[in-house]
């Protein structure tokens, strides 16, 4: 029986804060899901007109295109410092940085830690996909022990290249951050939890509570050389063992 | 106006920045510009403005990048090794057309060098320093009061041309105390609104601050816009000062502290009947090439004196070409040339 369009209910729509710019992400990449969650959060909190997003250097370099809000493209690793500058210039703005693991936890280590230590009232989304996606799948500081990357063709040997860095745990040792959590996106249950965490991280800022960090275990099917579905299973079965999910700090 | 105080160069620069409406200042401590940071630490919070001691010069320049994007007047300061760390950020500021003021109180280099006054960062300041085809306006004060005036001007030019502007002063100027009349504070509210700023997309389309495009044709266009602006700056913003050049047979070219010493040399030479003049570039970029060229057409010799191995000397020779003799005298490592020594160099080359 044909259905009258007028009888149909719209139950899934593009968030207002999400632009229709063409995605630059690979199929099955978690950057895409995360982008949508952030846009939805901006909608729900009604903050688009005072939000400034900071895009990193990495696969998310085009993040300034995805949201219907002001945005800045920062130098590699410096997004947390740029976010500090914006927030200090106008504390009424809602400022978030979106940073890969190379950006946030390697080249930007100092800026990342000190923005957290100052308790900047910003929201940081930290995308841990255990590789340098953009430059061709090199080792990230977060790469797993034994993980094969283009710069660790034999697998990451901790004697030569160190261990996967649990950056959120390091930040959780600081006194200032109000919310530090690690989330994942490999199934609907976890997508829902991550969505809640991101909303909380933005709400904290709106309520002027202080620094919030959401680390997200993300899939990079392209550089992991896995099908998207296998990449999801890999996070659930393997990655999660090194990086435990859940809240590390929750002082909100 | 009318406030006459005895102040150190670093304090005057800090105070002038405040009076120019600098709302956010970010820096990392380094000698010989520590007093600048300390003055800001005391006074910015008192005025309800932002002072952040950053974790590094890298962080400081990127905080400047953020504050500039948000549309406020903003500044960072450092000395040579710290300025090297800021180069990536300066390139991004230039590429993104962001106004900001950067102060370099130059010390001896390369490497850790020393903490004595030097002019060894001229190349870095005027020829790029960071990556990419860019320039920033570079102002070289020669006295403490002028350091204050040029700091005010730096903020004005940064806003007018949407570009980073550097105040390049040697450690001597930072440390020296002189009586100054501080400039009148500007009214922050009277500054024109920056329509491009990322200060919240309320009732307008989103603003984006960025320095890149992967399409070479688009990036070329972005570069052409910068080049066009640089030509405008070269046409309109060249500044220099001539002393006793009217009847001069020979002249010294010097900037900053060295120009100040050279003024004494001019008096000494004139007392001995030598018709010596002084040409002092105030904007180091854009360099006053045309004016210097014109001067060189009526004199036989132009001696460049610098506290470096001859960095500005390259611009002097480019400007003058074969028009006059262009000898050089320089000191390095933080050694300050004495008037007597400069005078003997003048005599040597004057024949
Ligand atoms: C100063 C500097 N060094 C290196 C690069 C090259 N580079 C671009 S992206 C990137 C790694 C990005 O990896 P990550 O932050 O993990 O983001 P992903 O692409 O995985 O999302 C590197 C090294 C750069 N742009 N700038
Ligand atoms: S390379 Fe990896 S991180 Fe980058 S877009 Fe593709 S899947 Fe995503
Ligand atoms: Mg990565």
Image (tube, rainbow, N blue to C red):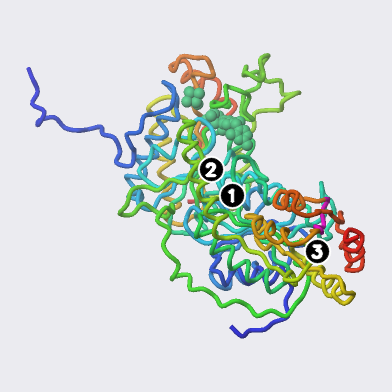
The residue to which callout 2 is attached is A74
Which residue range is magenta in the image? Answer: B303-309
The residue drawn where x is 56% and y is 62% is B24
Q: Are marks 2 and 1 on the same chain?
A: no
- The mark that comes first in sequence, 1 or 3, is 1
Graded by Cα atoms within 10 Å as few (under 14), some (14 to 19) or many (20 or more), the crowding at tag 3 reads many
Chain of residue at mark 2: A
Magenta segment: does it hold B305?
A: yes
Image quarter for residue B155? bottom right
Note whether B96 is above or below A239 in the view shown: below
The residue to which callout 1 is attached is B62
* Number of marks present in the image shown: 3
Instruction: Determine the secondary structure under disc 3.
Output: strand
Q: Label 2 near label 3: C-beta < 8 Å?
A: no
The residue drawn where x is 47% and y is 58% is B71
Magenta segment: does it hold B252?
A: no
Q: Label 1 near label 2: C-beta < 8 Å?
A: yes
Queried on whether the Cβ of the residue with tag 3 lies below 8 angstroms from ligand 1, the answer reads: no
Q: CA distance from mark 2 to mark 1?
A: 8 Å
The residue to which callout 3 is attached is B250
- Percent x, y for residue B176? 78, 71
Front: mark 3 or 2: 3
Front: mark 1 or 3: 3
- Percent x, y for residue B223? 51, 41
């Amino acid at each position: 029986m044909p259905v009258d369009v007028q009888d149909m209910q719209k139950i899934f729509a593009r968030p207002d804060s999400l632009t229709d710019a063409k995605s630059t992400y690979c199929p099955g990449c978690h950057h895409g899901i995360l982008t949508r969650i952030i846009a939805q959060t901006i909608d729900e909190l009604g903050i688009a007109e005072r939000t400034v997003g900071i895009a990193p250097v990495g696969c998310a370099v085009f993040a300034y295109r995805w949201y219907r809000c002001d945005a800045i493209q920062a130098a590699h690793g410096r997004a947390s410092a740029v976010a500090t500058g914006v927030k200090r210039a106008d504390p009424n703005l809602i400022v978030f940085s979106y940073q890969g693991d190379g950006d946030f936890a390697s080249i930007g280590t100092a800026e990342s830690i000190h923005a957290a230590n100052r308790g900047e009232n910003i929201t940081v989304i930290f995308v841990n996909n255990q590789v340098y996606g953009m430059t061709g799948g090199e080792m990230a500081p977060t790469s797993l022990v034994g993980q094969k990357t283009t710069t660790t063709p034999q697998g990451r040997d901790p004697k030569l290249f160190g261990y996967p860095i649990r950056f959120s745990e390091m930040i959780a040792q600081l006194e200032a951050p109000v919310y530090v959590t690690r989330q994942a996106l490999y199934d609907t249950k976890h997508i829902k939890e991550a969505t809640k965490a991101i909303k909380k991280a933005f709400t904290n800022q709106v309520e002027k509570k202080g620094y919030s960090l959401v680390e997200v275990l993300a899939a990079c099917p392209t550089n992991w050389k896995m099908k998207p579905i296998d990449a999801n299973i890999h996070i659930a079965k393997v990655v999660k063992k090194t990086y435990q999910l859940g809240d590390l700090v929750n002082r909100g | 106006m009318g406030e006459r105080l005895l102040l150190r160069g670093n304090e005057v620069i800090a105070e002038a920045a405040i009076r120019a409406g600098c709302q956010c200042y970010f820096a990392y401590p380094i000698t010989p510009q520590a007093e600048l940071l300390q003055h800001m630490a005391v006074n910015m919070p008192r005025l309800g403005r932002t002072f952040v001691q950053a974790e590094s010069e890298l962080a400081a320049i990127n905080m400047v990048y953020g504050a500039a994007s948000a549309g406020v007047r903003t500044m960072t300061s450092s000395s040579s090794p710290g300025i090297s760390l800021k180069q990536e950020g300066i390139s991004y500021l230039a590429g993104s057309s962001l106004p900001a003021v950067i102060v370099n109180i130059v010390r001896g280099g390369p490497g850790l060098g020393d903490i004595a006054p030097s002019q060894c960062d001229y190349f870095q300041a005027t020829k790029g320093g960071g990556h990419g085809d860019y320039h920033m306006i570079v102002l070289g004060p020669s006295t403490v009061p002028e350091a204050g005036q040029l700091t005010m001007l730096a903020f004005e030019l940064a806003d007018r041309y949407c570009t980073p502007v550097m105040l390049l002063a040697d450690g001597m100027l930072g440390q020296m105390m002189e009586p100054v009349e501080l400039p009148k504070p500007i009214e922050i509210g009277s500054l024109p609104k920056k329509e491009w700023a990322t200060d919240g997309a309320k009732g307008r389309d989103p603003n984006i601050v960025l320095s890149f495009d992967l399409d070479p044709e688009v990036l070329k266009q972005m570069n052409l816009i910068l080049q066009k602006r640089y030509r405008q700056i070269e046409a309109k913003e060249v500044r220099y000062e001539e002393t006793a050049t009217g009847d001069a047979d020979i002249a010294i070219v010097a900037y900053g502290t060295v120009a100040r010493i050279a003024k004494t040399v001019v008096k000494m030479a004139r007392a001995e009947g030598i018709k010596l003049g002084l040409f002092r570039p105030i904007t180091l970029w854009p360099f006053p090439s045309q004016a210097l060229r014109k001067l060189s057409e009526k004199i036989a010799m132009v001696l460049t004196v610098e506290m470096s191995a001859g960095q500005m000397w390259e611009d002097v020779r480019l400007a003058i070409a074969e028009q006059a003799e262009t000898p050089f005298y320089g000191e390095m490592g933080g050694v300050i040339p004495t008037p007597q020594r400069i005078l003997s160099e003048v005599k040597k080359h004057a024949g």
